Image (cartoon, rainbow, N blue to C red):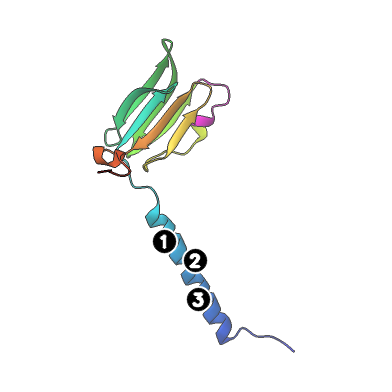
Amino acid sequence: MEKRFGKRDLIFLIVTAAVVLAVWGGFRLAGGSAGGQVEVTVDGEIYGIYSLNQEQEIPIEIDGEIQNVLQIRDHEADMVDADCPDRLCVDMKPISAEGETIVCLPHRVVAEVISSDEEAEFDTIAN
């Protein structure tokens, strides 16, 4: 007996596609909101806070030498150069959403997108 593609198969495929699109859309909407600034820390101390709205290249100096270069372009921050042996931070994708980070372990450099408004720093307010 030969099985054919029937009406139930078509309905099943349409429902499955709708569920997949709904889940994908939910993740897309619930993802991190666009941040306004990138905070750069070196060895746990703040090196600088830079606006994602202003295109610039930030040389990150450690012990008087430029170790990393962070580039801000098109509202994204990207580590474009590093003199560490593995250069994994250079291979990371550009960041733009709040909470995203780029980490250079050998130099202990962390670039993290933060919110531009001060109220977003608080999770809750206690009375």
Residue found at x 44% / y 22%: 68
Callout 1 amino acid: Gly
Q: Position of residue 12 (x, y in %)?
A: 55, 78
- Residue carrying label 1: 25
- Residue carrying label 2: 20
Which quarter of the image is occupied by the N terminus?
A: bottom right
Depicted 46 relative to depicted 1: above or below = above
Q: Position of residue 76 (x, y in %)?
A: 36, 38
The alpha-carbon separation of the residues under discs 1 and 2 comes to 8 Å
Callout 2 amino acid: Val
Foreground pick, 11 / 57: 11
Of callouts 1 and 2, the N-terminal one: 2
Span shown in magenta: 83-89
Is 104 situated left or right of 120 in this image? right
Q: Position of residue 14 (x, y in %)?
A: 50, 76
Of callouts 3 and 2, the N-terminal one: 3
